[in-house]
Structure formats: C-alpha cells, structure tokens
Image (tube, rainbow, N blue to C red):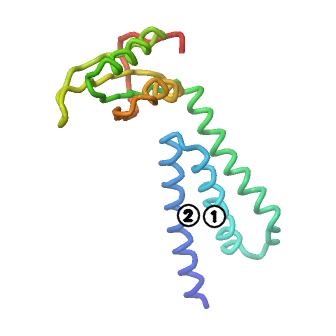
Amino acid sequence: MYIVGLFMIFFARILYVSSSVLRLLFLIKGRRFIASCIGFFEIMIYMLMLERLLGGGRSMTLLELGFYCGGFSAGTFVGGWLEEHLLNSFSLVEVIMADEPSALSAIEALRASGVGATVINGMGLNGPKLVVKIFCRQHDIITMQKFFAGYDHSFVTVSDVKRCIGGWFSKNI
C-alpha cells in the first residue's frame, strides 16, 4: 500500500506541474478563462495531495475544496486582467493581404482612425501582397483585428514585443 501511495504522489505531481505549465502558457497568450479553468483543477490536485501527505488533520469538505479552488481560479483570471491593464505590454500585429484596392482602403481607414501602420510590398504565391505592420498595446489587438475582419484574403499574426524604442503610437486607442 505504501508503494501505491508513492506512485499516487508521483503522478499527482506530474499532473500538477503539467497543468501549471499549461495554465501559464494560456495566461501568457491572453486566454484568461481557459487558464482559470485549468487553475481550478491544478489547485485541486495540489490540495488533495497536500491533505494526503500531511494527514492527521481534518479533511476539507467538498464545499471548502471548491471554494479554495475557485479562489485560485479567480486569482488566475484577475492576475491576467491586471497584467493586461497595468503592465502596458506591446504587440506587433502583422496583416498579409493581396495588393488590391479594398486592402488599401482598409489600411487608409486604419490610419484615419489614428493608428500608425507600416506597409511593405511583398510577393506571395498568388501575386503581389501587402504586409501591414502595426505596433499596439496588447489590449488594442481586438480593435486592430476588427479593421481586417471583413477582408476575406488576409492573414493576421500577433507577436509579443519585448521592447519598443522610438516610433509613433496613437493616443486615440
């Protein structure tokens, strides 16, 4: 029975660490809700194993365990929200689209709203392309993507930016 207990601890630790890594990766990618859900089960594993290892004390009720896990889950969500709103991190939104009049009008609409965009000419498999580079704050990514949502032939990528020096940023967004 002792050996079974050791393997339970071992595999619980694997589950705990794996879920912790996934939670952090989802949080970094801005997927707060999924990170919060993973956090709920991550801390449940932790508490159940802690209870098993410490033993001797009173066991948590299912309701207490649920509230403890819910608090951890909510803390993950709130921490992600605070990071997004307080750390002022930047992202690079790149849009690759066919060099057509509708693409140029989308870029002009973006610039008319006060957003700086750098346009680079390129060549894709099916002809000329425009590569639009937009540096923005992380919480403005959704706004940037809306400008190109109606354009069928666009490819949008978002990258985290470690540091920005110089340049022009809109104060309107």
Task: Pick the quarter of the image with the N terminus.
Answer: bottom right
Dot 1: what SS?
helix
**Sequence order check: which comes first, mark 1 or mark 2?**
2
Q: Amino acid at mark 1?
A: Tyr
On screen, 41 above or below 158? below
For label 1, count other residues whose C-alpha is less than 10 Å away and answer few (under 14), some (14-19) or many (20+): some
Q: Is residue 151 visible?
A: yes
Q: Position of residue 17 (x, y in %)?
A: 51, 61
Distance from disc 1 to disc 2, alpha carbons, whole Å, reads 7 Å
Q: Residue at x 48, y 11 (%)?
A: 113
Position of 72 with respect to 130 (left or right) is right
Q: Amino acid at mark 2?
A: Tyr
Q: Position of residue 103 (x, y in %)?
A: 34, 21
For label 2, count other residues whose C-alpha is less than 10 Å away and answer few (under 14), some (14-19) or many (20+): some
Which residue does the numbered mark 1 point to in the structure image? 46
Position of 16 with respect to 110 (left or right) is right
Q: Position of residue 145 (x, y in %)?
A: 46, 28
Which residue does the numbered mark 2 point to in the structure image? 16
Dot 2: what SS?
helix
Give 167 or 148, whichever is nearer the viewer. Answer: 148
Q: Residue at x 51, y 47 (%)?
A: 26
Q: Position of residue 169 (x, y in %)?
A: 44, 12
